[in-house]
Amino acid sequence: MDAASEEEPIQEEMVAISAGPFVRGTNDGGFDEQPQRTIFLDAFSIDRYEVTNHQYQQFVTATG
């Protein structure tokens, strides 16, 4: 058996993130990290687990 066939099945668990303020950046970091500011995000969902290279390859193969 190869490593790809032994990989865990895709987990499609999503986590709901509430709308609200998010502090972005820093006042002490590099030029591309400044300035620190608060932005307001809409509610969104995000995968609980990262996508593996194998899962991404499955997606690419399936969708062209």
Image (cartoon, rainbow, N blue to C red):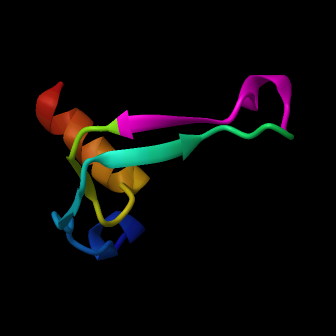
- Foreground: 8 or 21? 21
The quadrant of the rendering that contains the N terminus is bottom left
44 relative to 39, above or below: below
Residue drawn where x is 83% and y is 23% of the image: 31
**Relative image position of residue 37 (x, y in whole percent):** 60, 34
9 lies above or below 43: below
* Residue at left offset 21%, top offset 41%: 59
Please report the residue visible at 39 percent of the width from the left and 57 percent of the height from the top. 52
Q: Is residue 60 left or right of residue 24?
A: left
Of 47 and 23, the residue lying toward us: 23
Check the image and report above or below for 54 versus 5: above
Q: Residue at x 45, y 34 (%)?
A: 39
Magenta stretch encompasses residue 38 = yes
Q: Nearer the viewer, residue 26 or 54?
A: 26
Q: Is residue 15 above or below residue 51?
A: below
- Check the picture and name the quadrant holding the C terminus: top left
Residue 36 image position (x, y, % from top left): 68, 35
Query: Residue 55 in magenta?
Result: no
Q: Is residue 53 left or right of residue 24?
A: left
Q: How far from the left and from the top, in percent, is residue 46?
A: 27, 53
Which stretch did the figure color magenta? Answer: 29-40
Please give left or right for residue 50 compared with residue 16 in the image. Answer: right
